[in-house]
Image (cartoon, rainbow, N blue to C red):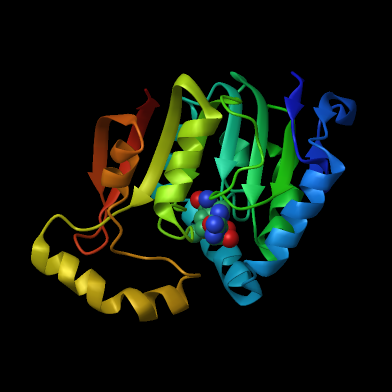
Amino acid sequence: MPAIELPVADVVAVRRRTRVGALLATGTLACALAAARRGRRRVSRPLFARWYGVLARRAERGEIGRRRQALLTQASGRVLDIGAGTGEAFKHVPGTATVLVALEPDPAMLRQAADRLGDGEAPAALVQGRSERLPFATATFDTVVACLVLCTVGDLAFTVAELHRVLRPGGRLLLMEHVRASDEALAQCQDLVERPWGWLHGGCHPNRRTLEAIEAAGFRLGPLERYGFPVLPHVQGVAVRT
Ligand SMILES: C[S@@+](CC[C@H](N)C(=O)[O-])C[C@H]1O[C@@H](n2cnc3c(N)ncnc32)[C@H](O)[C@@H]1O
């Protein structure tokens, strides 16, 4: 496994051919500070994690699974999966990946993800953390995977700025997300249901201007596949870090 700097205090699990010796600590003090910050802004939704685990396994057997697999064939080199959830993406990570780092803040999700960490072809590590403040050096990754997560992160602008920072120039952001409806009447429906929708779906915002935020952070969006219900439009594609 290529040496990659991981915040050792936040590593939850490592799997297959991963030599812990290759994971370099970023320093005890930095880790202690990160832990203190996490404590103040904890993400913990055990009921949602249990419900999502069942739902995600079922979805994985249908269209979502096929789409996720098609998207992940484009992952290569050092791969970061943000908001990994229950780890549904892991088994789709191809042999072109040299290492997978999965990041997830919620302990209940992390427990399920840890069981799947060895499912892919690359050596893998699971790290507890939030995407608004990624514990990785600048230009560490060749690929970042964002599946159904940019709708949920606490701060979208901070997150996409961090994704831009940790990707090398020319690196790829693989996206499978739902976004704000382009039809204004439907977008207003999304605005209306945002709060209750979030309570039921682990803090998800159905009405985010995700694609606009990605472009504003300095990515070049490629062609996007669009699918899903008009009131919850999904997009899938690649954004290149400029
Ligand atoms: C709908 S789930 C998607 C999980 C997975 N990516 C998938 O495709 O099945 C959203 C995930 O984002 C995680 N999440 C929430 N806030 C986050 C943050 N600030 N940074 C990273 N992940 C976050 C949640 O804990 C949850 O696991």
Q: Can the viewer see residue 147?
A: no
Q: Nearer the viewer, residue 26 or 221?
A: 26
Locate the N terminus and report the quarter of the image it occupies: top right
Q: Is residue 121 left or right of residue 74?
A: right
Quadrant location of the C terminus in the rendered image = top left
**For residue 223, which quarter of the picture?**
top left
**x and y, in percent, of residue 107 in the image:** 72, 63
- The total number of labels drawn is 0
Q: Percent from the top left, x then y, of residue 109? A: 66, 60
Tell me if residue 169 can be seen: yes
Image point 45% across, 77% down: which residue?
200
Q: Position of residue 35 (x, y in %)?
A: 76, 57
Please say if 25 is above or below 55: above
The quadrant where ligand 1 appears is bottom right
Residue 86 on image: x %, y %: 63, 55
Q: Which residue is most to the right?
A: 21
Residue shown at the point (46%, 60%) measured from the top left? 152
Q: Quadrant of residue 189?
A: bottom left
Q: Residue at x 32, y 74 (%)?
A: 194
**Does 76 appear above or below 52?**
above
Q: Nearer the viewer, residue 79 or 137?
A: 137
Residue 184 found in image quarter: bottom left
Give the answer, above or below, for where 112 lies relative to 203: above
In this image, 180 relative to 3: left or right? Answer: left
Left or right of 12: which side holds 204? left
Name the residue: 59% across, 49% down.
84
In the shown orientation, is residue 223 left or right of residue 32? left
